[in-house]
């Protein structure tokens, strides 16, 4: 029973986006595609414990979802005839596997670019992408947007209706129309990775989302091989994801400075550095993602935490702030300054951000760590308690509680 459920979870993590995207391509119906995949998952949970896990779980799930879509469309056809549904039935009957279609034929990219159509409002683009591409629940997306679940449900419905009524095609746009969607596509791929790299609820990491985002970034690079920001994003995600194995120890979070760098994935690091070199070779000034990749590369190439080139990291953050002013970037810069010039220098900068980041959960945690480094234990303890109260995951809370114990038990 446990093995069968684990197999279902694994195949959903690996294949959900591919199956959903293929069904949306042939039916044009976002809700139908998601419902059919969910139905296939429920059938797998019923059947596999008794029948055994099939030899090809992904193919089983794909076939079951496709058959469910065929049945649903046939029932609809008894009530009304639609050319679109007739075409969908014909295409669903074909083998959906085939050879690698390349980036223009990849259903995941088609779905991504459809969700990022410029006719859709930006908030709707991001929300629909997180729902359809990343598979986040409406509740999770609502939390990210700081709105109610009902409000987000209506926003998603309006966005889907806009796609249908405006006749937005399910396809990667022609080369001369790519630029108008590229920025939005890169932004949502980054958001998907961020949710996987540091989930906003539940488990601290969602490796399926992070890995999917890395793959999507790679597909965008195939589509736009000379785009330095696409290359920069791919480099950033590879370099960040390379640290995944070292970010926990016995289920507990490990901070960057304490990670065992021997557990970092060197193949991913090398691939990230190669993508960054390709981005630099374009000769264009570094953009938002490339600057972040430059920072990640400085961490990835340092033999240990003490050897990190914090001076260059501060310079990169200066460039990021000039390009895209943000209190969150300023907070990250303050941490880098603290490592370069000492915790007192970092604290002065953090205190200046208090009003702008009053509701930002990482702020008290950053302040607590800098106070601890400065030897101000009682103030650090108070800051850790404040950080624990607003921690977003249990794993973050446990890390902060360990730090709190350290500053309150030192002699």
Image (tube, rainbow, N blue to C red):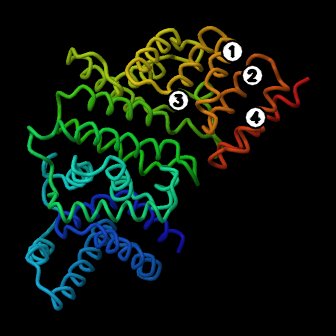
Within 10 Å of disc 2 (Cα), the crowding (few <14, some 14-19, many 20+) is: many
Mark 4 vs mark 1, CA separation in Å: 16 Å
Picture quadrant of residue 92: bottom left
Mark 3 vs mark 4, CA separation in Å: 19 Å
- Left of 115 or right of it: where is 87? left
Task: Give whichever of discs 4 and 1 has the lower sequence position.
Answer: 1
Task: Give whichever of discs 3 and 2 has the lower sequence position.
Answer: 3
Residue 371: image tag: 2
Residue 343: image tag: 1
Q: Secondary structure at mark 4?
A: helix
Residue name at image x 47 percent, y 78 percent: 49
Q: Is residue 39 above or below residue 383?
A: below
Confirm or deny contact between disc 2 and disc 1 (CB under 8 A): yes
Residue name at image x 52 percent, y 42 percent: 198
Q: Nearer the viewer, residue 214 or 283?
A: 283
Q: Residue 205, how many percent across, how many down?
A: 52, 47
Q: Secondary structure at mark 2?
A: helix
Closer mark to the observer between disc 3 and disc 4: 3
**In the rendered view of the protein, which quadrant contains the C terminus?**
top right
Within 10 Å of disc 4 (Cα), the crowding (few <14, some 14-19, many 20+) is: many
Confirm or deny contact between disc 3 and disc 1 (CB under 8 A): no
Mark 2 vs mark 1, CA separation in Å: 7 Å
Which residue has dot 3 on it? 328
Which residue has dot 4 on it? 384
Q: Secondary structure at mark 3?
A: helix
Residue name at image x 32 percent, y 33 percent: 234
Mark 2 vs mark 4, CA separation in Å: 10 Å
């Amino acid at each position: 029973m446990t093995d069968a459920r684990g197999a279902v979870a694994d195949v959903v993590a690996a294949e959900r986006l591919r199956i959903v995207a293929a069904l949306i391509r042939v039916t044009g119906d976002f809700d139908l595609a998601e419902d059919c995949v969910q139905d296939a998952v429920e059938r797998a949970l019923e059947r596999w414990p008794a029948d055994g896990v099939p030899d090809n779980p992904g193919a089983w799930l794909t076939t079951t979802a496709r058959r469910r879509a065929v049945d649903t469309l046939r029932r609809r056809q008894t009530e009304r005839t639609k050319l679109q549904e007739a075409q969908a039935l014909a295409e669903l009957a074909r083998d959906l596997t085939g050879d690698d279609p390349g980036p223009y034929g990849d259903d995941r990219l088609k779905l991504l670019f459809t969700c990022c159509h410029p006719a859709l409002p930006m908030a709707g683009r991001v929300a629909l992408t997180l729902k359809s591409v990343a598979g986040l629940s409406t509740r999770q997306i609502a939390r990210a947007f700081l709105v109610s679940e009902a409000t987000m449900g209506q926003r998603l419905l309006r966005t889907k209706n806009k796609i249908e009524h405006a006749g937005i095609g399910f396809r990667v746009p022609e080369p001369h129309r790519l630029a108008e969607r590229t920025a939005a596509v890169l932004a949502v791929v980054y958001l998907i990775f961020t949710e996987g790299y540091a989930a906003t609820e539940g488990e601290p990491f969602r490796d399926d989302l992070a890995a999917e985002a890395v793959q999507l970034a790679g597909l965008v690079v195939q589509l736009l091989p000379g785009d330095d920001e696409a290359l920069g994003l791919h480099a950033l995600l590879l370099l960040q994801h390379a640290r995944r194995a070292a970010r926990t120890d016995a289920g507990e979070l490990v901070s960057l400075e304490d990670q065992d760098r021997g557990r970092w994935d060197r193949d991913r690091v090398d691939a990230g550095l190669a993508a960054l070199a390709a981005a630099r070779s374009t000769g264009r000034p570094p953009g938002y993602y490339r600057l972040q990749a430059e920072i990640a590369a400085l961490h990835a190439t340092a033999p240990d935490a003490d050897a990190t080139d914090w001076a260059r990291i501060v310079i990169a953050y200066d460039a990021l702030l000039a390009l895209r002013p943000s209190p969150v970037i300023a907070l990250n810069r303050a941490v880098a300054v603290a490592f370069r010039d000492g915790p007192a220098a970092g604290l002065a900068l953090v205190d200046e951000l208090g009003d702008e980041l009053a509701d930002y959960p990482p702020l008290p945690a950053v302040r607590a760590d800098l106070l601890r480094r400065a030897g101000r234990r009682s103030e650090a303890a108070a800051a850790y308690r404040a950080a624990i109260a607003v921690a977003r995951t249990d794993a973050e809370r446990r890390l902060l509680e360990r730090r709190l114990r350290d500053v309150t038990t030192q002699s």
